[in-house]
Amino acid sequence: MIDLGKDEKCEFMHLHVDAVEKVRGSLPDEEKQYELAELFSMFADTTRIRILYALFEAEMCVCDLANLLGMTQSAISHQLALLKRAKLIRPRREGRAVFYSLADGHVRTMLDQGMEHVNE
Amino acid sequence: MIDLGKDEKCEFMHLHVDAVEKVRGSLPDEEKQYELAELFSMFADTTRIRILYALFEAEMCVCDLANLLGMTQSAISHQLALLKRAKLIRPRREGRAVFYSLADGHVRTMLDQGMEHVNE
DNA sequence: TTCTCATATGAGCATCTGCTCATATATTAT
DNA sequence: ATAATATATGAGCAGATGCTCATATGAGAA
């Protein structure tokens, strides 16, 4: 057996060198990995999940959401800014109020898929 | 107009009281919200994303993954423990090695949906 | 048994995240 | 113009997260 140094024991004793090499090429590139992680992190918080579920039902302004979820205007606004940056929601100004709605259907699909897994 | 106190200005000046009330009933219950957030948080990290993409291609052991991703065995093992806890992957012992594979198809579907959104 | 290898896991630490609080901006009304 | 209202945003802080390092566990070999 070839000696590959003290830190490379198990990595090369297995038969899977070819499998590993095959997989290496099929990974999404670094930027896509980062964008994916960032997208999913939007769904990784209960406040944002509740905001999105609320927007499934109706377009709502910041204070409506704050009232609905029992949170401060500031907390909601910060989260809306994140969701907007991730292009999951879209603002519409009407006088002083800003109404938010879902940007596209993927949001719904993704949450549905997640809910399906959670419900087994 | 009814005076509702200093902190409840905007919440009740809008026409959306009914919309808000309708939505209140349609939110998933607290436990589901939490489970959903926990599930999505599994996809909210590039290391775990790369592990899952790797397992799309082939069942792999811890050290194979560590080698593939250029990370320590410990770091990978910690992440695998999280993915296992979330029931996204499944271990299979074979001698000293433990091989991991995807637990079910939802994982693939969810990542695909995310990738679709990222790719616009 | 003892030794080695593969994996798992607890502690510690630096970074990230989600809130609060204060304040800034934008729009309308007077 | 000034005042009031709705939203946005920066700073600060407590808790969560992902790594490293050391060590524990589990399984096969001698």
Image: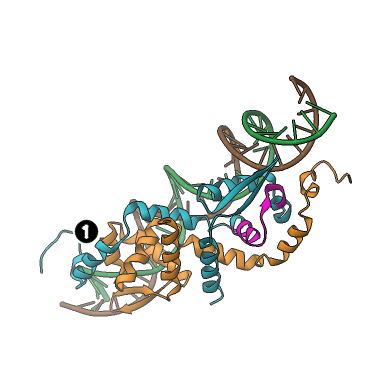
Chain colours: A orange, B cyan, C brown, D green
Taking the image as shown, residue B55 lies to the left or right of residue C26, namely right
Q: Which residue is labeled 1 in the image? A: B7
Q: Residue at x 78, y 52 (%)?
A: A15
Q: Is residue B51 magenta?
A: yes
The vertical placement of A11 against A22, above or below, is: above
Q: Quadrant of the C terminus of chain A?
A: bottom left
Q: Nearer the viewer, residue A16 or A75?
A: A16
Q: Residue at x 20, y 61 (%)?
A: B8
Mark 1, secondary structure of its residue = loop
Pointer 1 local density, CA inside 10 Å: few below 14, some 14–19, many at least 20? few
Specify the segment rendered in magenta. Answer: B49-64
Task: Report in which chain the residue with disc 1 lies.
Answer: B
Residue A49, percent from left and from top: 39, 61
Magenta stretch secondary structure, dominant: helix
Number of numbered callouts drawn: 1
The vertical placement of A57 against B35, above or below, is: below
Q: Is residue B108 magenta?
A: no
Residue A87, percent from left and from top: 46, 72
Residue A89, percent from left and from top: 41, 72
Q: Residue at x 61, y 64 (%)?
A: A33
